[in-house]
Amino acid sequence: MSSQFPQARPRRLRRSPELRGLFQETEFTLNDLVLPIFVEEEIDDFVPITSMPGVLRIPESKLAGEIERYARAGIKSVMTFGVSHHLDASGSDTWSEHGLVSRMSAICKDAVPEMIVMSDTCFCEYTDHGHCGVMHGAEVDNDRTLVNLGKQAVAAARAGADVIAPSAAMDGQVQAIRRALDEAGFSQIPIMAYSTKFASALYGPFREAGGSALKGDRKSYQMNPMNRREAVRESLLDEQEGADALMVKPAGAYLDIIRDIREASRLPVAAYQVSGEYAMIKFGAQAGAIDEGRIVRETLGSIKRAGADLIFTYFAMDLALAGI
C-alpha cells in the first residue's frame, strides 16, 4: 500500500509557519541593506521624485535630521548621491573640499558617527553634459577621468566617507582610486566597486532623481546587458585592481550574473536594486496588481539567494519601519 504513495514528502516541512521559518534557507536583515539617498543643495524643502513614489530629494539643510531618523529606524548604511547646482564640463565640484560630495559625507558622519557612509564616486550629477567623466569630442576620455576620480575619492575620504564606491565605469578606475587613496594616507578606506554595471533601461527614474543633463547614452562605457562572460571578467578585473567588494547593477534582471560572480570570487558581493526596479513595484502596487510588501521581500530575497551579501535598495527605510 505504501508503495503507491510518495516516500519523499517535502510538504512535511511546510505544514506550519513555525516549520517554514525553521527550515528557511535564505534570510536578510537590515545589516544586509544600504539605503541610497539623494541630497540637493540650495533648496529649502523636500522634493518628491514623481517616477519613484515615496522617494524624496533631501535638502542639504535637512540631511542631518534625516540621517538621525534613519539611524533610529535601524538603518546601518547609506549611499550618498548629490544633486548639484554647480555643474561644469569636468564635475570639479566633486573634488573641492567645500563641494557637495565632501559636505554630504561630513554632515552624515557628524550627525551619526556610527552610520556607514558610502560615497558614490562619479560625475554624472556634476557635469553639464551628464556623462560620467571628461569629454573628448563625443567620447568620454577614460584616463583623464581616472585622475579626477582619484581626486574625488580623496576629498570624500577626507570629509569622513567610510567607503568609496566608484560607479563611472571607467577602465582602471579601482586601481587609480586605490593609488590616490593610499598616497593621501587613506589606505584603510575600502572600495566598493560598481564592478559589473550594465547600460540598463532600468535606470530611467534615477535620471529624474539625480537631475541628470545627459543627452544620448552610456553604452560605450557601461556593459552590454546581453554579455554574461564579460560581466564576470569586469568584476574579476576590479578584484585584481584592489577592490574590497564587488557589485552588480541592476540586480533583479541579473540574478545569473550575481551567482556567476559569487562563484568566481571570494570578495563580498553587493547588488543594487535600481530605480526602475523600485518604480515597477511601486506603480504595480498602486494599480492593485501586486502586494507591495510581499513583492519587496520576495525580490530582495531572490537577490540574496542568488549570492549577494549586501543589497542597495530604496525600500530599506520601508522595511526598517515595518520591522523587516
Image: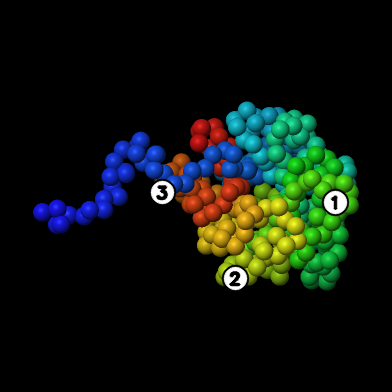
Residue drawn at the location 70% of the way across and 65% of the way down: 237
- Three-letter amino acid code of the residue under disc 1: Asp
Question: Mark 3 sits on what residue?
Answer: 289
Residue 10 shown left or right of residue 255 in the figure: left
Distance between the Cα atoms at labels 1 and 3? Answer: 51 Å
Quadrant in which the N terminus appears? bottom left
Find out whether the residues at labels 1 and 3 contact each other: C-beta distance under 8 Å.
no
Residue drawn at the location 50% of the way across and 33% of the way down: 322
Q: Closer to the observer: label 1 or label 3?
A: 1
The spot of residue 259 in percent (x, y) is: 54, 59
Find out whether the residues at labels 2 and 3 contact each other: C-beta distance under 8 Å.
no
Distance between the Cα atoms at labels 1 and 2? Answer: 31 Å
Question: Mark 1 sits on what residue?
Answer: 182
Query: Is residue 44 something that shows in the picture?
Result: no
Q: What SS does tag 1 mark?
A: helix
Residue 103 shown left or right of residue 222 in the figure: right
Q: What SS does tag 2 mark?
A: helix
Question: Mark 2 sits on what residue?
Answer: 229
- Three-letter amino acid code of the residue under disc 2: Arg
